[in-house]
Amino acid sequence: MLVTDTLPSRDPGASSGNGLRWLAAVIIAILIGLATLPFLASRAADATMDALQSAADKQRVYGRLLDLLTDAETGQRGYVITGDAGFLDPYNASAAAIPAAVRDLKPLAAGRGEQATLDEIERLAQRKLDELAATIRLRRDGGFAEAAAIVGNRSGKADMDRLRLLIGERSAALERERLALRDRLDTTLGYNAVIGLCAGVASMLILGSGLFVVTRSLHAGSEAADHARRLADAQADQARQSQARSERLTVTARMLQAMDSLTRTDELHTVLPAFLPKVLPGSSGTVYLYRNSRDYLQRAAAWGGGHHAELVSPNQCWGLRFGHAHAAQTGDDMHCPHLDDVPPAPGRTDLCVPMISQGEVLGLLSVSVPQGPDTAVELAAATTISEQLAIGISNISLREVLRRQSTVDELTGLYNRRYFDETLRRELFRAERMRASLAVVMIDLDHFKHMNDTYGHEAGDLVLRTVGRCLREGVRRSDIACRYGGEELVLVLPECDAAAARTCAETLRKTISALDLHLGDATLPQVTASFGIALWPAHGEDAHTLVQSADRALYAAKHGGRNRVCMAS
């Protein structure tokens, strides 16, 4: 008997199916790897931006602490030298704020080294405050000599020098850290863009290869081809979104850097319209900020065309009333009333996002974006942008407040002595360059001490506030009105000759003497003022001599009977 052994035959279709499954597994692994890279790069960019913002916040608090220490020491020195209690205003404000500024730095410390530096700063700051308080107390109780003795032993100067050194070293280190973080952010964003582009190109190549193999092996099953196409489409879409995210991060970083250079919120209308259309492509919208009265929000910047209301009441926005983002599409019953004049256009969604920083609502971001597959992404991006805008605007407002506090007298609303000294020197240089005239007018309120003693300091404050308003409203926009100290006021009148200066002074004198002031049920006595005028260069070629001449003219007006204007001889 002939026995024939038979071997099992190999199924070509099964072999081809195994090969397709193996190829699909490789493609999926590569696509997952490519999808992960842009995500990781974006996370790294976000972390770098957070670190950059933290370094900026720390640097700002360090700078504020040094300014407070300097203002406190300046107020103390002025009081010790002159005995004028008006110099204690900046000292009292700064001394009260210094402990809080040190506490604000404590949670921001990174590492034992910085914590030790902060402990040393806190110890020296407290010792400096004790020294300042002691000299002020001695000057008030014992006179100039005892207070000058403490100042003369230079221990306070040594503490202040040490504080400047420590704070300066920390500020310099933070500046180096910010520069390094910005370089890292630029590098990361560059890598992210390249990764996104490479991911897209690689996806296309892999898609082409996969489709070629699947086309040749359609008999093995069309499901593998459909799966590969869906996966490739998803990867291409993710690559596109990653690239858009990278571009948005780049533009956002540039916008925040531009905002970091602003000193006033009214400059936002020149910066935000240049960046927000790039951050939110195809959008239009408005940034509103609360006015000081907190009754209305005023338009600060707008982009994308269309109608944008100048003022918005908080009750007219559902986003502000809810305290979170609110979106409205065409026909939505919850459409914000402040958008009634421009109802949602077909195919667009309106979004209102309150801008909140440290628990305080600073304003509103109102955006209109086109509806489409990426609508949810754009709305999420707008919400994130509102948070970053809130931080930037909060920093601008803080800089604006600090600048105003350092140059404006709180009671009268006039510029302070420091601003006067700086401005007079600048205006003298300008007058010399332009060969123009310049006048300085010294003003002293008559019998002001008697007013305080008889009716109390509340009456004196009312008189100073009212006279300050008369000066602000009674001079030209180019003139500078300042509080020189106590009840003494001073005007700097650029491009003003003797006749014009006398006319201005006489007008103000009559306005002040015509005031009718009441404190409660009591009618205050008539307020009058004496004026002394000095002209450059006739009465002085430098700031010191010019002020002395105006002061002598003021004393001549006092000795001549008060409530009059005298010109320097």
Image (cartoon, helix red, strand yellow):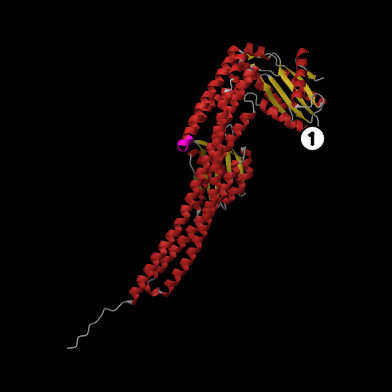
Picture quadrant where residue 221 is located? bottom left
Prevailing SS of the magenta stretch: helix
Among all residues in the image, which is located at the extreme front?
A: 153
Residue 555 vs residue 224, the one in the foreground = 555
Left/right placement of residue 153 relative to residue 472 reads left
Q: Nearer the viewer, residue 24 or 143?
A: 143
- The magenta-colored residue range is 109-114
Whether the magenta-drawn stretch holds residue 110 is answered as yes
Task: Count numbered badges in the picture.
Answer: 1
Q: Is residue 534 left or right of residue 394?
A: right
In the image, 449 versus 407, the foreground residue is 407
SS for tag 1?
helix
Quick check: 33 left or right of 464? left
Q: Nearer the viewer, residue 142 or 546?
A: 142
Q: Quadrant of the C terminus?
A: top right
Residue labelled with disc 1: 433
Above or below residue 134? Residue 169 is below
In the image, residue 556 lies at what x, y percent?
Answer: 78, 15
- 213, above or below 496, in the image: below
Residue 34 seen in the figure: yes
Residue 457 versus residue 493 in the image, above or below: above
Q: Is residue 346 visible?
A: no
Quadrant of the drawing holding the N terminus: bottom left
* Amino acid at dot 1: Arg
Q: Residue 28: give x, y in percent of width and height.
A: 41, 63
Q: Residue at x 62, y 18 (%)?
A: 80
**Label 1 crowd (10 A; few <14 / some 14-19 / many >=20):** few
Residue extending furthest toward the left: 1
Q: Is residue 161 magenta?
A: no
Residue at (40% x, 74% y) in the render: 217
- Residue 445 drawn at (x, y percent): 70, 17
Using the rendered view, name the quadrant where residue 514 is placed: top right
